[in-house]
Amino acid sequence: MYGQKAVVNGLALELPRGVISGFVGPNGAGKTTTLRMLLGLIRPSSGEGEVLGSSIAHPAEYLAKVGALIESPAFYPSMSGQRNLEILCALGRHDAHRVDQLLTQVGLGDRGGDRFKSYSLGMKQRLGIAAALLPDPELLVLDEPTNGLDPGGIREVRGLLRALADEGLTVVVSSHLLSEIQTICDHLVVIDDGMLRYQGSIDGLLGAQTAEVVAVPEHASDLTKLVEVCTAAGHSARIVEDGVRASAPADWAPELNRRAMAAGITLAGLAVNRGTLEDAFFAMTDDDSHPIRAHLSDPEVTP
């Protein structure tokens, strides 16, 4: 609660181990507040949860096994990346012998001696991830790790996170870049207004969407007739630019081709639009009646 407003309201999460889990929602949905509660930075006004088997009421019991990068990493600009990590090791009582290994792991092995202020944004984010890995964690929590990065920097961070997960680390990534979440994550949590909208596999979410079959007739004069062919088969359809979009299963595309031919329509193009994570996200957060919102689990907060 912030004042009289419940920023996180009855949120029930269950995060599996050993995967990259995306954590998404509109601005103000409660993502950062949730992460701060899990990390012991703020206390919930009510409710229970566990992180790595320990209660969030006693964060000291599990924080030694958690690495986190919340918002932008803060380092001494005039010091090298290596020296910055060594200082963090001294402050956190971590093994300083891991610094060289981590710099290599995040792709900074040959730049560890350079000053932090000379790093690109992508390099700064990778150094921040290296800092989060200093405790040799079982759980890594990253809030907007690709924020402000160019495509090259995003690809660098994406490859790093995939490599970490392949080594068995559990990674939770909060991001506004839905295309990146779809590309890298195995599991997904969607929240809105502090409440859970979906949790489960990304494939499961996308599979719950109705696909669209997109047909382009050779002659534009056949557009209306093609819509009639689709609706006669029980599929709603609409004209979009030079083609027709029909809400239908992907495997109906060959049948549409046959029906169009029988109706004297020659198709110049036929494709299936299976939808994206962005489509599913807006369907859930813009429509209170969306059926995917029923995919909830038992009230736990357990990675």
Image (cartoon, helix red, strand yellow):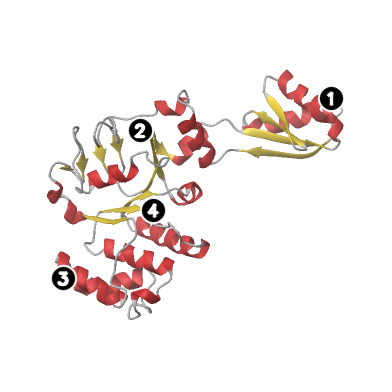
What residue lies at 73% left-to-right and 18% top-to-bottom? 232
Between circles 2 and 1, the one closer to the viewer is 2
Distance CA(mark 3)–CA(mark 1) = 76 Å
Is 90 left, or right, of 234 in this rendering? Answer: left
Is 277 left, or right, of 251 in this rendering? Answer: left
Q: Quadrant of residue 3?
A: top left
Q: Percent position (x, y) of residue 184?
A: 45, 52
Q: Percent position (x, y) of residue 199?
A: 38, 36
Return the disc, 1 or 4, that comes first in the chain's sequence.
4
Residue 40 vertical placement versus 286 (above, below): below
The residue where tag 1 is placed is 263
- Nearest the viewer among 61 and 87 is 87
Assess disc 1: are there few (<14), some (14-19) or many (≥20) residues with their C-alpha within 10 Å of its C-alpha: few
Assess disc 4: are there few (<14), some (14-19) or many (≥20) residues with their C-alpha within 10 Å of its C-alpha: some
The amino acid at mark 3 is: Ala
Distance CA(mark 3)–CA(mark 2) = 39 Å
On the rendered image, what quadrant is the C terminus found in? top left
The residue where tag 3 is placed is 90
- Dot 3 falls on a residue whose secondary structure is helix
Distance CA(mark 1)–CA(mark 4) = 52 Å
Residue 144 badge:
4
The amino acid at mark 1 is: Ala
What residue lies at 35% left-to-right and 69% top-to-bottom? 105
- Dot 2 falls on a residue whose secondary structure is strand
Return the disc, 3 or 4, that comes first in the chain's sequence.
3
On the rendered image, what quadrant is the N terminus found in? top left
Q: Percent position (x, y) of residue 256?
A: 74, 29
The residue where tag 2 is placed is 196
Return the disc, 2 or 4, that comes first in the chain's sequence.
4
Q: Quadrant of residue 194?
A: top left
Distance CA(mark 3)–CA(mark 4) = 26 Å
